[in-house]
Image (cartoon, helix red, strand yellow):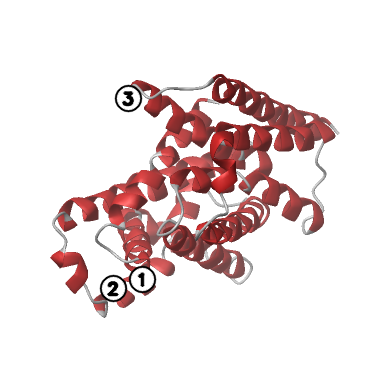
Amino acid sequence: MVLLLVLSMIWGTSFILTKRGLESYSNFQLAAFRMLICSVVMLPFLFRAVKLINKKNIGPILIMNIIGNGIPALLFATAQTKVESSLAGILNSLTPLFTMIVGMFWYKIKTHWIGVLGIFIAFAGAVGLFSENLSTFFSGQNWYGLLIALATFFYGINSNNVKQNLKDMDSISITALTYFIIGPACGIYLLFSDFSYALSTPHYVQNFLSIAALAVFGSALASLGWNVLLKRTTAVAASSVTYIIPLFAIVWGMLDNEKISVIQLSSMGVILLGVFLVNKGKENSLKQ
């Protein structure tokens, strides 16, 4: 539970760091820098990890690089050029639902009804956090939020992919191999990228540091923690971290003297209840 909270706190800052990075850099540049920096951070562990690659796991590793990280990073960056962080936070909470659906229908994983109930209760709580803004969620260009929904579907695929197909690897090796293909590919893209607009903005250095922080903490280290968590629990229970992420956005707002409504407080309780049921469902599934 402690690891779950730590990951939620780290990932809870990803949206604001992405927003800052987009002030100077394009969505493609931000996603590319994010993947490249991650690959550099994990480079010391890569030399041992590549020895674990074989014909059986090369496919899952490619899925992890492209579908699990590269494409979602671009989808999130693209979506946040048009949508508010609140919408991004809610749609990010679709991850456990897609993880459960992919696990049940593709990998034939049995899920206890308590866990299924917890998924829907926690998602209802996530929606409740931002219920005051629901009427404007899909107005204007907020349809870009569908890109986030697609990214969470890819996350659901990758969660099951790592859990089922790379279970013999240790967490550090999995994390190192997560970026070893997509990282260099993004580096090549950046070599031919035009940074004239970025350099014309007043805070391009600070905004690059935001991207670097997003990569180091929000991707590399958080991915390592998530892989450790995935080893200890089910893919659905591990992905329930996305439900707690919005809670930290609310808490940071409270610390900044922002008002919090009774509905938001109630929704936080609903989310925690849902996450509890998800983990309870995990325990019952293991007993079956």
Going 39% across and 50% down the picture, which residue do you hit? Answer: 220
Query: In this rendering, which labeled residue sits more in front, label 3 or label 2?
Result: 3
The answer to which image quadrant residue 241 occupies is top right
Query: Toward the viewer: 134 or 88?
Result: 134
Residue beneath label 2, please? 190
How far across and down, in percent of the image, does residue 149 sit?
60, 56
Among numbered discs 3 and 1, the one appearing first in the sequence: 1
Q: Secondary structure at mark 1?
A: helix
Residue beneath label 3, please? 256
Mark 2–mark 1 CB contact (< 8 Å)? yes
**For the residues marked 2 and 1, what is the alpha-carbon distance in whole angstroms?**
6 Å
**For the residues marked 3 and 1, what is the alpha-carbon distance in whole angstroms?**
37 Å
Residue beneath label 1, please? 186
Among numbered discs 3 and 2, the one appearing first in the sequence: 2
Query: Is 266 placed above or below 41 here?
Result: above
Residue 61 visible in rendering? yes
How far across and down, in percent of the image, does residue 52 sit?
51, 61
- Is 144 placed left or right of 96 in the picture? left
How far across and down, in percent of the image, does residue 167 sit?
62, 50
How far across and down, in percent of the image, does residue 88 sit?
50, 48
Going 18% across and 73% down the picture, which residue do you hit? Answer: 196
- Is 288 placed left or right of 266 in the picture? right
The answer to which image quadrant residue 281 occupies is top right
Query: Toward the viewer: 170 or 192?
Result: 192
The amino acid sitting under disc 2 is Leu
